[in-house]
Image (cartoon, helix red, strand yellow):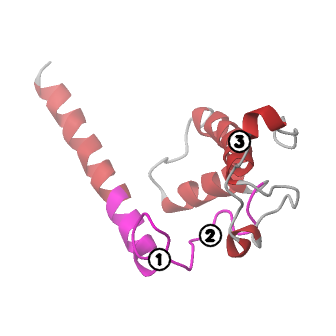
Amino acid sequence: MEVGAAVPTTQIGLGATPLDPDEAAGLVPVHITTQAYLNAWEQANIVLGDRLASRQKKRDLLDEGFVRDLHRQMFDKTWQWAGTFRQTNKNIGVDWSQIAVKLRDMLDNTRYQTVLIKISERSQI
């Protein structure tokens, strides 16, 4: 689905969950009113972000700046706050106040694992 394209009502389904008014306040497209429609819209944004990430040749993918920029590009057609850390808790994920710390931990751990894999591959040669 192309960003900005209308989602056919057959894809939304009858009785689709309406968006929470607090969540809807941060939406860029004001015509999205159901969770199903939002999911489809976000998926289209994610595809664009995936294309961006796959074109990266020199940029460090495990850099917080890159991750935030990727998030912004993935969701800037959906959310006003795209590319920033959330400031409220959700029913999944870590406490909002821990997002920056947990992201840094995840990026550092992944970088470390990558180094270990490279060392292991070299020792097997």
Residue bearing mark 3: 40
Report crowding for label 1: few under 14, some 14 to 19, many 20 or more residues within 10 A (C-alpha): few
Check residue 117 for magenta coloring.
Answer: no
Q: Which secondary structure lies at badge 1?
A: helix
Quadrant showing the C terminus: top left
Residue 69 locus on image (x, y percent): 63, 57
Residue bearing mark 2: 84
Quadrant showing the N terminus: top right
Main structural element of the magenta stretch: helix, strand or loop? loop
Q: Nearer the viewer, residue 19 or 26?
A: 19
Q: Nearer the viewer, mark 3 or mark 2?
A: 3
Residue 63 locus on image (x, y percent): 48, 56
- Name the amino acid, label 1: Trp
Q: Gap in Å between the C-alphas at discs 1 and 2?
A: 11 Å
Closer to the chain start, of discs 1 and 3, is 3
Range of the magenta residues?
78-106
Closer to the chain start, of discs 1 and 2, is 2
Report crowding for label 3: few under 14, some 14 to 19, many 20 or more residues within 10 A (C-alpha): some
Q: Is residue 47 left or right of residue 31?
A: left
Counting labels gives 3
- Name the amino acid, label 2: Thr
Residue 1 visible, this angle:
no
